[in-house]
C-alpha cells in the first residue's frame, strides 16, 4: 500500500474512533449532525455524510445502536445494552430510564406467541421535568 493510502486509511479509522468516543461521552442520544458539530474542528475535512457512513459501520459492528423514536432525525446510542428510553414530546430529548429490563414481559409475549422471544424495546413518552415545569408556569392558575 502506498504511503498516501496508508495515511488516508489511518485518518479514516481515527475519525471513526473519535466518533465512537464522542458518542460514548454523552448521554444525550445525539443526532449525526450533533456528532459532526463536535468533531468538525478536530477534523477540518470531515463532512456530515462521513459521520453518517461511520455511524452506519459502527452500527454494523454492534458498537452503536440507532434509536427509532419517531423523530425526524435518527439518534444514536453507544450504550448497546438493553435499556429503556424516555422521549420528551415537547423538546425531543431522549433519556435513559434507570430501571430493570423486564424478563417477565418477554416471557409473557413468548407464551402468547408460542415463539422464542430474544429481546424487546420500550420507549416511554411524555414531558421531561423541564418541559413539565415550563408548561405549569405557562398555564394560568
Ligand atoms: Zn422536554
Ligand atoms: Zn440510551
Image (cartoon, helix red, strand yellow):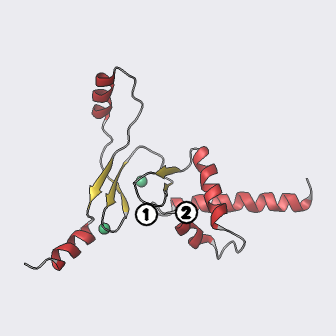
Q: Mark 1 highlights which residue?
A: 28
In the foreground, 21 or 51: 51
Residue density around tag 2, few if under 14, some if 14–19, many if 20 or more, within 10 Å: many
Furthest residue in direction top, as rendered? 114
Q: Residue at x 64, y 56 (%)?
A: 54
Instruction: Name the spot of residue 27 as percent of width and height, x first.
Output: 43, 61
Instruction: Name the spot of residue 22 as percent of width and height, x first.
Output: 56, 64
Horizontal side of residue 136 vs 116, given as left or right: left
Q: Residue at x 29, y 34 (%)?
A: 105
Furthest residue in direction front, as rendered? 72
The numbered disc on residue 62 is: none
Instruction: Name the spot of residue 115 as percent of width and height, x first.
Output: 38, 22
Q: Secondary structure at mark 1?
A: loop
Up the image or down, 84 lies above or below 3; here it is: above
Front disc: 1 or 2: 2
Query: For the residues marked 1 and 2, what is the alpha-carbon distance in whole angstroms?
Result: 12 Å
The numbered disc on residue 32 is: 2
Which quarter shows the C terminus? bottom left
Horizontal side of residue 9 vs 126, given as left or right: right
Up the image or down, 89 lies above or below 99; here it is: below
Q: Quadrant of residue 45?
A: bottom right
Instruction: Name the spot of residue 61 as percent of width and height, x first.
Output: 61, 44
Q: Residue at x 60, y 61 (%)?
A: 19
Residue density around tag 1, few if under 14, some if 14–19, many if 20 or more, within 10 Å: some
Q: Quadrant of residue 118?
A: top left
Furthest residue in direction right, as rendered? 2
Q: Secondary structure at mark 2?
A: helix
Up the image or down, 36 lies above or below 122; here it is: below
How many labels sit on residues? 2
Q: Residue at x 73, y 59 (%)?
A: 12
Amino acid at each position: 500500500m502506498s504511503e498516501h493510502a496508508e495515511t488516508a486509511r489511518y485518518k479514516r479509522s481515527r475519525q471513526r474512533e473519535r466518533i465512537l468516543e464522542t458518542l460514548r461521552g454523552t448521554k444525550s442520544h445525539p443526532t449525526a449532525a450533533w456528532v459532526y458539530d463536535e468533531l468538525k474542528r478536530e477534523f477540518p475535512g470531515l463532512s456530515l455524510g462521513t459521520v453518517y457512513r461511520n455511524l452506519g459501520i459502527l452500527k454494523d459492528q454492534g458498537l452503536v445502536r440507532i434509536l427509532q423514536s419517531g423523530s425526524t432525525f435518527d439518534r444514536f446510542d453507544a450504550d448497546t445494552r438493553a435499556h429503556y428510553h424516555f422521549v420528551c414530546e415537547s423538546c425531543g430529548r431522549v433519556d435513559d430510564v434507570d430501571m430493570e429490563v423486564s424478563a417477565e414481559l418477554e416471557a409473557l409475549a413468548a407464551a402468547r406467541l408460542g415463539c422464542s422471544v430474544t429481546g424487546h424495546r420500550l420507549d416511554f413518552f411524555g414531558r421531561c421535568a423541564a418541559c413539565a415545569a415550563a408548561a405549569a408556569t405557562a398555564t394560568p392558575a
